[in-house]
């Protein structure tokens, strides 16, 4: 059995992690409630709270989006222990902004399972992930690699050191210390987040179970302290880098990193740049900058709008810093936003994020601003624009944002789709009556990522009908599914038969993606007769969910995959609510699909699976200054 075959379980774990859409960090308060549909067993929802009544009680309200409006719905009263209670019944648990422990622990445990299957493969996976977008997963992988037990220990043979074991902790260090021009490296907040992850009791327990570290009580941090010490020293020795972090708004984070590792600078310059006043410790150990007067923190309080605009144009700070320094009584005005755009303070992503503000201030009617905005949306590299489109008023602006999201999705999956043909089948039978609109919405957000010439779409009940997508965009997909209503019985085979004229080429693999509720009989015979030879199924389960998160009725898609001996990858409905998850899920789904045997003699570029890509990945190495 070759290595790729033995890594089948690892690939399934990685695919599940890549496709999982819940974030390990939420930057606003929320509540969790039990929900079996999620891998972690709970569901997170955004909330706020307000003190009401006599005596005062903290009343929690759930925040839900209805169209463009946020609706507040009372949930219950927040107790001192964090539980939310209504009418004497516990309805959830309050969570402050920050780590979502259940997700972080689940992800860490899955990484540990891959490491137990193959230590080196896990290290190559972490090296591969460093250049990807999934920040939560990168933090978890870095945390794990810093702590795992392969750390370059001497291997003794005959009483002498014969050689040294692999040092995979270097990979975790390298993830923390390497810089990338594309912004996919770790900023100070992510470095701090690694420490917070390793501090979680659930993750500390996993590390103890695996034999990482020695303490039976304290969390194990591996080489985190050492890596942060190197990171801080490098920036102390390169003051411009430290000043850049100040301008980017990371002052307090850098200070917190220094506190956690007890960093001792070589000169007072480090404290001066951070404007960090030093007081003597009780034990008298501190020696630098004690009592030294530091420059006051910059403030724009008392400045006029004109003075602020002049300062922005002259100093060119990034927009995050501009917003942080703006006095509340001034705020973001048309003149200030114009000055910031002129000074280059807003990145392409900033311009997309602030589109509703630009529209409200009338700046999208200014030609220079409109030109700069147009360049930004054309360079979009994620689907954020699709979410922003729901918050603007102009139809033209909404369409341009949606086009940008479509383009970003297509670019994201273009390389992955080489050598792949996709068949997309949507159940429109009567049992889908309550879920057909959700299904159409999901398809519209998902399908435009696939190249038109290699994707074939059908809808089916007892009869199948091929759907023609005239334009590879959300608007094109929406138009193609316009007017569809749920009706009739269910024959999954009908969805296949109507597409069987579009057979994959000899050098192509094929993937079938199903959207439905599985209320039918297995259909392996129809798949085999079609000649479409799918290597895997993708399945979006809509409708038919029980209160506890299970599914009513059948399991036709999963049973058919089992009969055919091919994998069936479940695509969560939550994927479609996350603009970052859709391209990531498509790429993970395609990459995890097994590669078939090519029978043509023509010279072709073979499709490479996710495991093969990871196996070819060079292990990350420490930068020269940190070696």
Image (spheres, grey):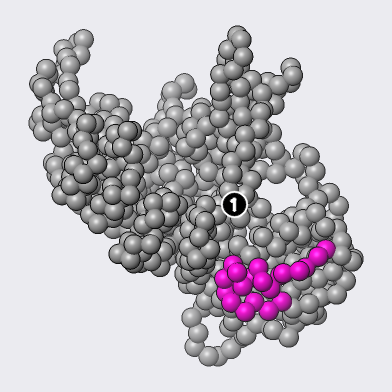
Residue 64 versus residue 542: which sits nearer the camera?
A: 64
Residue 622 versus residue 465: which sits nearer the camera?
A: 465
Q: Position of residue 200 (x, y in %)?
A: 49, 30
Residue drawn at the location 33% of the way across and 33% of the way down: 328
Task: Tell me if 217 is positioned left or right of 493 in this view.
Answer: left
Q: Position of residue 158 (x, y in %)?
A: 34, 44
Dot 1, how many residues are within 10 Å of its Cα: few (below 14), some (14-19), or many (20+)?
some
Residue 532, above or below 236:
below
Secondary element under disc 1, as helix, strand or loop, is helix
Residue drawn at the location 48% of the way across and 32% of the way down: 97
| Residue farthest to the bottom, as pictured | 601
Residue drawn at the location 66% of the way across and 43% of the way down: 38
Residue 263, above or below 558:
above
Task: Tell me if 219 is positioned left or right of 315 in this view.
Answer: right
- The question of residue 12 being in magenta is answered with no
- The question of residue 483 being in magenta is answered with yes
Residue drawn at the location 17% of the way across and 16% of the way down: 279
- Residue segment shown in magenta: 467-486
Residue 461, above or below 116:
below
* Residue 152 seen in the current view: no
Give the quarter of the figure containing the N terminus: bottom right
Q: Quadrant of residue 305?
A: top left
Q: Position of residue 547 (x, y in %)?
A: 78, 39
Q: Which residue is mark 1?
A: 577
Residue 537, above or below 576:
below
Q: Position of residue 625 (x, y in %)?
A: 19, 48
Residue 238 versus residue 374: which sits nearer the camera?
A: 374
| Residue farthest to the right, as pictured | 489
* Residue 220 seen in the current view: yes
């Amino acid at each position: 059995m070759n290595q790729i075959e033995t890594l089948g379980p690892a690939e399934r774990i990685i695919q599940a992690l890549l496709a999982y859409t819940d974030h390990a960090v939420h930057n606003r308060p929320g509540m969790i409630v039990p929900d079996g549909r999620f891998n972690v067993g709970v569901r997170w929802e955004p909330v706020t709270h307000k003190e009401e009544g006599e005596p005062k009680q903290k009343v929690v309200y759930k925040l839900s989006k209805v169209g463009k409006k946020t609706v507040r719905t009372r949930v219950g009263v927040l107790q001192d222990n964090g539980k939310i209670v209504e009418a004497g019944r516990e309805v959830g648990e309050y969570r402050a902004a920050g780590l979502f422990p259940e997700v972080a622990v689940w992800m860490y445990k899955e990484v540990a399972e891959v490491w137990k299957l193959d230590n080196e493969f896990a290290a190559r996976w972490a090296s591969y992930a460093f250049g990807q977008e999934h920040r939560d997963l990168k933090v978890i992988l870095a945390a794990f690699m810093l702590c795992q037990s392969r750390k370059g220990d001497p291997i003794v043979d005959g009483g002498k050191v014969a050689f040294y074991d692999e040092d995979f902790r270097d990979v975790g260090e390298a993830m923390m210390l390497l810089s990338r021009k594309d912004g996919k490296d770790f900023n100070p907040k992510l470095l701090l987040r690694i420490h917070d992850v390793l501090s979680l009791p659930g993750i500390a327990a996993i590390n103890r179970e695996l034999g990482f570290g020695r303490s039976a009580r304290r969390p194990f941090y591996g080489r985190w302290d050492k890596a942060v010490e190197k990171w801080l020293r490098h920036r102390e020795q390169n003051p411009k880098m430290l000043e850049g972090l100040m301008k980017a708004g990371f002052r307090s984070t850098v200070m917190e990193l220094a506190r956690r590792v007890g960093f001792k600078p070589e000169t007072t310059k480090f404290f001066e740049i951070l404007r960090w006043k030093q007081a003597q410790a009780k034990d008298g150990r501190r020696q630098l900058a004690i009592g030294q007067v530091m420059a006051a923190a910059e403030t724009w309080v008392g400045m006029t709008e004109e003075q602020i605009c002049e300062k922005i144009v002259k100093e060119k700070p990034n927009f995050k810093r501009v917003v942080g320094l703006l006095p509340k009584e001034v705020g973001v005005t048309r003149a200030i936003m114009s000055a910031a755009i002129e000074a280059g303070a807003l990145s392409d992503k900033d311009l997309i994020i602030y589109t509703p503000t630009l529209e409200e201030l009338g700046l999208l009617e200014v030609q220079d601003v409109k030109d700069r905005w147009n360049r930004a949306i054309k360079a979009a590299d994620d689907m954020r624009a699709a979410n922003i489109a729901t918050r603007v008023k102009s139809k033209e602006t909404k369409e341009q944002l949606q086009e940008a999201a479509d383009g970003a999705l297509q670019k994201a999956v273009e390389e992955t789709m080489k050598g792949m043909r996709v068949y997309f089948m949507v159940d429109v039978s009567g049992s889908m009556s309550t879920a057909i609109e959700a299904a159409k919405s999901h398809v519209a957000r998902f399908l435009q990522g696939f190249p038109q010439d290699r994707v074939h779409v059908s809808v089916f009940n007892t009869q199948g009908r091929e759907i023609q997508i005239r334009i590879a965009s959300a608007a094109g997909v929406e138009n193609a599914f316009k007017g569809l209503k749920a009706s009739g019985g269910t024959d999954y085979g009908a969805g296949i038969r109507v597409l069987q004229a579009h057979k994959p080429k000899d050098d192509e693999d094929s993937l079938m993606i199903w959207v439905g509720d599985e209320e039918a009989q297995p259909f392996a015979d129809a798949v085999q007769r079609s000649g479409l030879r799918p290597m895997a199924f993708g399945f979006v389960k809509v409708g038919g969910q029980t209160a506890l998160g299970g599914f009513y009725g059948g399991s036709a898609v999963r049973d058919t995959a089992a009969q055919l001996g091919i994998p069936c990858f479940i695509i969560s409905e939550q994927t479609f609510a996350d603009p970052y998850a859709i391209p990531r899920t498509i790429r993970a789904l395609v990459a995890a699909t097994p590669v078939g045997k090519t029978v043509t003699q023509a010279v072709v570029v073979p499709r490479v699976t996710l495991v093969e890509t990871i196996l070819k990945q060079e292990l990350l190495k420490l930068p020269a200054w940190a070696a």
